[in-house]
């Protein structure tokens, strides 16, 4: 099996070695730059937030740059993906500027930036994928108006950016969930014979390089630079499967962990409706504070839940 893996080729090159090189480059890059990155000031309202104080933050700028460089080197370049790469970097930079700011950016400012990036990504998809403007229901494809699709795709990107960002609060959690989600999409793309499967694997390699330093007790933090860019990338993969519904299962725990908090806060602010009073959000804080789970238990149990959700996709594609 190992010999077969080593022989697997992508554009005449060993995919195994491409992934290995990406992983090693990410580790070396993080090691070389971690001391010049901004340092975390601790999070006053997060469970055990004080433990993050003083750690290098914003490491997402390193592994996202590693990903972009490697993807542009090894995967055939086209205009559509080049635009997505620019938007990925824009999402990363917006997060990094917030990471290094002495005064954290307000929710409105970050939300507007996310909105612009999400809208640009949705318009790019519509421009290059005219035959896939619609929704997939099992084996039936239903076309919908372009404006409606742009709104749906924009919501997907915006949601993915923010729920992934909200899930970054426990050592190893966001990165580990990201690996499972990306491997789920990789499996889907292998069935569709899409280059985006290779993109997913390259990001997995970069995340593993980051997790080398981030497993509890962490030495570095991805910050908004990593979590917001990762969320954008997951949204892109979901869109490129041409079946938006797959996002609900492939990123199930991200949605559950980060999404409940967004819903709770939105209802309180917009409608003065107070729900989930006894549930602390993000959900990983509820697990640690109310259920008394350790960080390791949170990571492993959340990953197990995601594996179960992803297995539904696997079984559906095998059927």
Image (cartoon, rainbow, N blue to C red):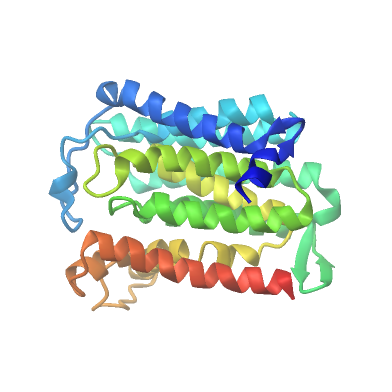
Which residue is drawn at the image coordinates 33% and 69% (left, top)? 268
Evaluate whether residue 272 shows in this view. yes
> Residue 145 at what x, y percent from top left?
80, 60
Q: Quadrant of residue 55?
A: top left
- Judge from the rendering whether residue 236 lies leftward or rightward of residue 294; answer left or right: right
Which residue is drawn at the image coordinates 22% and 31% (left, top)? 39
> Residue 72 at what x, y percent from top left?
65, 27
Q: Quadrant of residue 17?
A: top right
Evaluate whether residue 238 shows in this view. no
Q: Is residue 62 above or below residue 315?
A: above
> Residue 43 at what x, y percent from top left?
19, 48
Which residue is drawn at the image coordinates 53% and 52% (left, top)? 158
Which residue is drawn at the image coordinates 59% and 28% (left, top)? 70
Q: Quadrant of residue 187?
A: bottom right
Along the viewing direction, whichever of 140 and 1 lies nearer the viewer: 1
Q: Is residue 217 above or below residue 29?
A: below
> Residue 69 at what x, y percent from top left?
57, 25
- Judge from the rendering whether residue 210 lies leftward or rightward of residue 67; answer left or right: left
Q: Residue furthest right?
A: 131
Along the viewing direction, whichever of 125 and 272 lies nearer the viewer: 125
């Amino acid at each position: 099996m190992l010999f077969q893996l080593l022989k697997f080729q992508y554009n005449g090159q060993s995919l195994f070695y491409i992934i290995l090189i990406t992983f090693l480059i990410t580790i070396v890059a993080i090691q070389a730059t971690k001391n010049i990155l901004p340092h975390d000031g601790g999070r006053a309202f997060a469970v055990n937030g004080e433990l993050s104080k003083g750690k290098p933050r914003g490491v997402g700028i390193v592994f996202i740059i590693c990903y972009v460089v490697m993807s542009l080197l090894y995967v055939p370049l086209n205009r559509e993906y080049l635009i997505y790469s620019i938007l990925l970097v824009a999402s990363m930079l917006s997060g990094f500027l917030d990471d290094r700011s002495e005064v954290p950016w307000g929710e409105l400012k970050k939300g507007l930036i996310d909105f612009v990036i999400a809208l640009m990504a949705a318009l790019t998809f519509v421009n290059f994928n005219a035959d896939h403007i619609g929704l997939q229901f099992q084996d039936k494809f239903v076309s919908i108006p372009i404006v409606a699709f742009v709104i749906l795709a924009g919501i997907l990107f915006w949601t993915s950016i923010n729920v992934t960002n909200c899930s970054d609060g426990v050592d190893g959690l966001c990165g580990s969930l990201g690996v499972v989600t990306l491997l789920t999409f990789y499996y889907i793309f292998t069935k569709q014979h899409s280059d985006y499967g290779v993109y997913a694997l390259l990001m997995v390699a970069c995340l593993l390089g980051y997790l080398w330093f981030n497993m509890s007790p962490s030495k570095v933090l991805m910050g908004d630079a990593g979590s917001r860019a990762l969320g954008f990338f997951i949204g892109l993969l979901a869109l490129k499967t041409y079946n938006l519904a797959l996002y609900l299962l492939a990123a199930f725990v991200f949605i559950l962990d980060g999404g409940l908090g967004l819903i709770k806060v939105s209802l309180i602010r917009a409608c003065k409706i107070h729900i989930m009073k006894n549930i602390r959000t993000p959900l990983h804080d509820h697990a640690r504070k109310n259920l008394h789970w350790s960080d390791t238990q949170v990571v492993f149990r959340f990953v197990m839940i995601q594996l179960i959700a992803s297995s539904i996709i696997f079984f559906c594609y095998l059927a």
